[in-house]
Amino acid sequence: MKTGALTVLMSVGFVLPVLGQLNTLHNHYRPGDVLIKQQVEFINPGQSGANRLWDLSKLKTVNEEYTLRYDLPPLEGDSIYILGDKRYLKKKVADNELIVGSEHNTMYYYRLTNDSLLQQGHENPSVVLEYTKPMILMSFPLNYGQTTMSSYQSEGLYSGTVNIQTEGTMTTAADAYGKMILPPGDTLSPVLRVKTVQTIFDIPTGDSYTMDETNNAGKQLETCRWYSKGYRYPVFETIRNINLSDSTEIFKTAFFFPPQDHLYLDTDPENQALLDELWKDTENDTTTIDNEQSKTVMLEDIMSCKMYPNPVESYLNLEYELKEDAKVSFELYSLDGMPVK
């Protein structure tokens, strides 16, 4: 019988984990994955914050089969990856470092470097665009309450003849979490919302150009994606493009990724393990809270764990007992869902 004790210094309250983080193992794009998402009518993504409820049960479908796929870049010979206008030696590229996402006649070029997911360009029959200063879409791990911001620059061609130059900022924030009622009526919880806001300013050529709101009001692309533990890709997405000068909408749309369809991926053992764990915890949850400010949690049938005092102000004592050998890990979260340890 194995026993152990742990004392943790904390400056915030303690609660059981309400949400896992997004990370490269469970949420990075993978070559070979093909997703079928449904285009649905747009809904207001709502406010940021904790314990939100998003009701999708009455959404109407616009397009039942909208395909998104991820692949490795094409190879030049057997040794060089081609990603847009850039070339990379295959032997110097890590697995899944370079990804091409294809949807709606557009190819998006991504690179994962130093745990940051970069967009390096995109192209379609009308536009070829390269980010000369790549745009950071997300930095892993990402938890509720975290925000990253970066600037970018791009250049390219429209219709093969018209030069394009843009610049702007990309802000990514895990700004809300809560519960979601899916179109079939099922409830998914918890879900984490990640909101990205990209500002886009054209850069006219010429010596007399200066950036100001008069000659270049710009546009703003707002995208919200909802993630749930055990699913590599979002379960819902809203997109809205607006003019910054007068806040008028250029377009808006939304997509539903049916969670059951995530399972048609050829293999995703990392996320399947999370789903198995969640289902098992739901079946075997025997959590009890007594009136003496102590908490005992039974995990399956092999471990007992006591945490005290509850609530905690400074020191949290954690004692656990195992009936057989097992790997043990703990996650600490603050009352607003922020990871502490």
Image (cartoon, grey):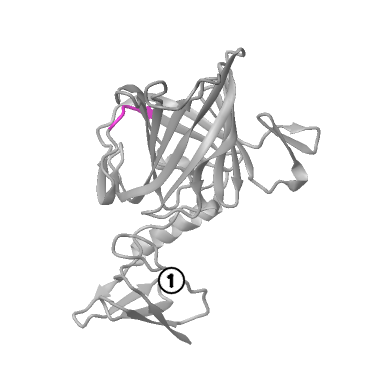
Q: Is residue 8 above or below residue 252?
A: below
User: What range of the chain is rendered magenta?
Assistant: 39-43
The foreground one among 128 and 29 is 128
Q: Number of marks in the image?
A: 1
Quick one: quadrant of the C terminus?
Answer: bottom left
- Amino acid type shown at disc 1: Phe
Q: Position of residue 68 (x, y in %)?
A: 51, 31
Residue 277 picture quarter: bottom left
The foreground one among 239 and 330 is 239
Q: Residue furthest left?
A: 291
Q: Which residue is mark 1?
A: 330
Horizontal side, residue 203 vs residue 78: left or right: left
Main secondary structure type of the part rendered in magenta:
loop
Q: Position of residue 181 (x, y in %)?
A: 28, 43
Horizontal side, residue 143 vs residue 55: left or right: right
Q: Position of residue 164 (x, y in %)?
A: 55, 21
| Residues packed near mark 1 inside 10 Å, few (<14), some (14 to 19) or many (20 plus) | few
Q: Is residue 177 above or below residue 234?
A: below
Q: Is residue 21 magenta?
A: no
Residue 79 seen anywhere in this rendered image of the structure: yes
Q: Is residue 3 above or below residue 144?
A: below
Q: Is residue 71 above or below residue 316?
A: above
Residue 192 seen anywhere in this rendered image of the structure: no
Horizontal side, residue 223 vs residue 160: left or right: left
Residue 195 picture quarter: top left
**Secondary structure found at label 1:** loop
Name the residue rendered at 42%, 77% in the picture.
303
Horizontal side, residue 79 vs residue 275: left or right: right
Name the residue rendered at 49%, 46% in the picture.
138
Q: Position of residue 103 (x, y in %)?
A: 52, 27
